[in-house]
Image (cartoon, rainbow, N blue to C red):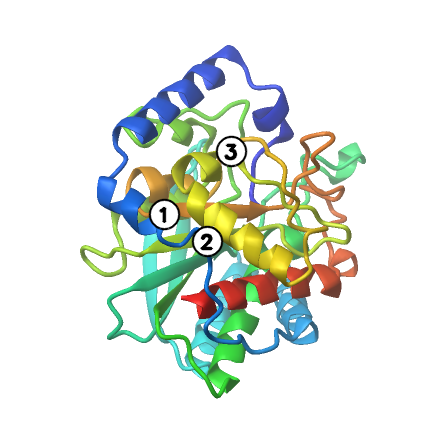
Amino acid sequence: MHSWAITRLLFMNKSFLATLTLLAALASCKTDKKTESQTSETEQPAQTMSAPAFDADSAYQFIARQVAFGPRVPNTPAHVKGGDYLVAKLKQFGFTVIEQKFQAKTWDGKTLNARNIIGSLNLQATKRIVLTSHWDSRPHSDQDTTVADRTDPVPAANDGASGVGVLLELARSIQQAKQKPTVGIDLVFFDAEDWGDGEKAVGDKEPGNEFDYIGFCLGSRYWAKNPHVPGYKAYYGILLDMVGAKGATFAKEGYSMQFAPSIMNQVWQTASQLGYSQYFVDTPGGSITDDHVAPNLIAKIPMIDIIHTNPQTGGFFGAWHTNEDTIENIDRGTLKAVGQTLLQTIYNE
């Protein structure tokens, strides 16, 4: 998925701990009072509209199609094909599309030709919800148990394609629904999320970029600094990361609870009402550097992270950053739980 070495979650060095402390201080001192007031209003979701049914089989096919291109590593043909596919699908489902092309410098000195892909619905709506996922693949399977395979790119069925597949099916479901949501919806597919190296990367320490030294989340940081619409604001945002594995559990990620606790609680309450508490577990999770950090700190958009973590070990799903992150490990039940919860959350607005 993204993303971030387990060492970032469990075995952070003193430098990283200092970074987290500074990040927390920045977030607390820069909280916007208006945002706090807005999010508090959403603590008790009122189900005024019934969401359409989320088709997990369709979401699964969207994931399989991405994986069929091969690993979507920036600067490769598979990456170009994968991005073109997302653009075509968003347009097919009635979304206005903006391709935000940019070049990103990696921790190891490479230049990536990247693009964030944004699809917008209900352009006239002033109240907007932003839903995001990253669509690129990690260039090496550094967590693989077979040493010889660690230089291979990750197939990225769960760590990347699963969140994108859920959002594409959400777009298709809304297009087919008789009742449409009243809020504006922006789907943002971030690029260049999964290139980093938490042990070796170094970067700038500009306020809001303290997390950048690990080299991940390049697309979301670019978008937060350069929104696709000048002055863009959203009521809140939801990031999906690794949302398709069998037996997935989504704990309440730490930065999400710091930046947007009322949104986090609203989504988890909606999941509980739908019968998905075995996935959306009501327990604190670790604080994970992910694509929601830059939108919170730089763009000032309260955004939460729905991410698969293991409450017992603090790690991610078993095939994380390995050659085994394949379509065979994607579970329709997990996709249904995430997708239906997301749809109902939107329709509650």
Instruction: Answer whether residue 338 is visible to the viewer in this image.
Output: yes
Q: Position of residue 23 (x, y in %)?
A: 37, 26
Q: Are marks 2 and 1 in contact (CB under 8 Å)?
A: no
Residue for point 29% across, 40% down: 298
Give the image quarter of residue 106. top left
Judging by the rendered image, the residue that carries numbered circle 1 is: 40
Q: Are marks 3 and 1 in contact (CB under 8 Å)?
A: no
In the picture as drawn, the residue positioned furthest to the left comes out as: 231
Q: Are marks 2 and 3 in contact (CB under 8 Å)?
A: no
Judging by the rendered image, the residue that carries numbered circle 3 is: 254
**Above or below 213: residue 222:** below
Foreground: 284 or 296? Answer: 284
Task: Tell me which label, 2 or 1, sits earlier in the chain.
Answer: 1
Residue for point 49% across, 35% down: 289
Task: Tell me which label, 2 or 3, sits earlier in the chain.
Answer: 2
Give the image quarter of residue 187. bottom left
* Residue at mark 3 to residue at mark 1: CA–CA distance: 18 Å
Mark 3 packing: few (<14 Cα in 10 Å), some, or many (20+)? some
* Three-letter code, disc 3: Gly
Q: Is residue 38 left or right of residue 62?
A: left
* Residue at mark 2 to residue at mark 1: CA–CA distance: 16 Å
Instruction: Answer whether residue 74 is visible to the viewer in this image.
Output: no
Q: Position of residue 259 (x, y in %)?
A: 39, 38
Judging by the rendered image, the residue that carries numbered circle 2 is: 238
Q: Position of residue 46 (x, y in %)?
A: 46, 64
Q: Position of residue 212 (x, y in %)?
A: 40, 31
- Please tell me whether mark 2 or mark 1 is closer to you in this view: 1
